[in-house]
Image: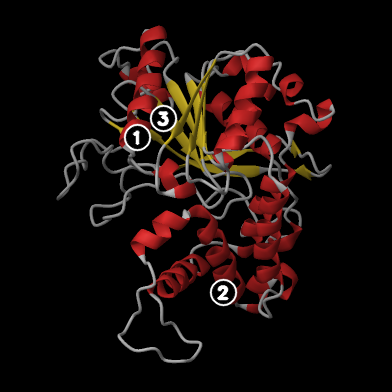
Amino acid sequence: MPDSDTLAFVDRPADSVGLVTPHIAKFDTPLPLACGKVLPEYELIYETYGTLNAARNNAVLICHALSGHHHAAGYHGSEDRKPGWWDAHIGPGKSIDTNRFFVVSLNNLGGCHGSTGPVSHNPETGRQWGPDFPMVTVSDWVVSQARLADQLGIERWAAAVGGSLGGMQVLQWTMTYPERVANAVVIAATPRLSAQNIAFNEVARQAIRSDPEFFGGWYAEHDTVPKRGLKLARMVGHITYLSEDAMGSKFGRDLRSTDLNFGFDVEFQVESYLRYQGDMFSTAFDANTYLLMTKALDYFDPSAAQSSDLASALAPAQCPFLVVSFTTDWRFPPARSRELVDALTRAGKAVSYANIDSPHGHDAFLLPEPRYHALFNAFMTRIARELNIDEMAIDETAREETL
């Protein structure tokens, strides 16, 4: 929760949630996983923005994408100039209005930003989990998130919201715990990966696994990091997040200098950009976690247990859906969102769909596109109205209890 005594720091935007402090939820009850293994205990790191009201019906769950984490909005320190990854849409007066909603954002199980994952220590061996950390799936994440909701005293989410891999988690919530989701927002997502998407993930994984410093996943014990592999994996992934138009308008064929070098060093601006992104990622993200997250993406296919009938898989869902895609997103193209919308319609579910014209590719879901913002804002405003969520109805007792 933001600390009211430290909110006013220099240049803080008026619509920011301000300074935020992460919290750790500990779970001693073993968690059976879809892979057949059991996690004996675990922790989830999360942040909250806004205040839980007396009725406890204004909570919104934020599910993150592949390389995301719990820090979705606000700032961690007065000197921090980069806000959370979805700050464009979370805060006072924004689409997910923290004057109305109590927002919960967590780092998924298996992550590397504070939740139990490969960088954590195995309580049974005392050794870092490393490559021994069990495979986790989207359904495992949802079960762990439900336990977090229980700990926070949240019986039902006013909305579960997510983009990309986060959207898959939202879908899983509506199937696993339909009675606990009042509304679902699925953005730039897909009900299952195409062969091409699985192929991109496999190239990224092989880049990591073939790095000489990977050591079969035990790189920490060798006091090293497979930076080259992580860098290549991020470069490949980043290309798929941007559209051709976005890359063209941002970089074109611009050179870093006026002359060609006739060599293999960086010459084009786009090369410099990709290498920079790769270098930054290689020092900020765990390689074993990247492998886990991409496999969770690959495995997600709720229709598989229903003879590939997605409508049957979605039958348990009880809530209205907002599905959003972007015209230039070729990672999870509009056709995949329309596949989801068609299945929801066949299943008799209430669904609103918009394909937003944007030049930014898959990354558009992170940005404040005007039409996207207006649509998102209207949907969330409807939720507040239908659930009688009054931005002035704040119960300080409920606020303290959630911590």
Relative depth, front residue between 341 and 231: 341
**Residue at disc 2, secondary structure:** helix
Mark 1 is surrounded, within 10 Å at the Cα level, by few (under 14), some (14 to 19) or many (20 or more) other residues, namely many
Q: Answer whether labels 3 and 1 touch (C-beta < 8 Å).
A: yes
Q: Quadrant of residue 172?
A: top right
How far across and how far down the image is residue 377, in percent? 34, 25
Q: The residue under label 3 is which amino acid type?
A: Val
Q: Nearer the viewer, mark 2 or mark 3?
A: 2
- The residue located at (28%, 52%) in the rendering is 77
Instruction: Say how many tags the image has.
Output: 3
**161 relative position to 386: left or right:** right
Mark 3 is surrounded, within 10 Å at the Cα level, by few (under 14), some (14 to 19) or many (20 or more) other residues, namely many
| Quadrant showing the C terminus | top left
Q: Quadrant of residue 169?
A: top right
Residue carrying label 2 = 227
Residue carrying label 1 = 90
How far across and how far down the image is residue 144, in percent? 64, 35
Relative depth, front residue between 168 and 121: 168
Render colour scheme = secondary structure
How far across and how far down the image is residue 213, in percent? 66, 78
Q: Earlier in the sequence, mark 1 or mark 2?
A: 1
How far across and how far down the image is residue 82, in percent? 31, 54
Residue carrying label 3 = 103
The residues tagged by marks 3 and 1 sit, at their Cα atoms, a distance apart of 8 Å
- The residue located at (49%, 91%) in the rendering is 263
| Quadrant showing the N terminus | top left
Q: Earlier in the sequence, mark 2 or mark 3?
A: 3
Q: Quadrant of residue 217?
A: bottom right
Q: Earlier in the sequence, mark 3 or mark 1?
A: 1
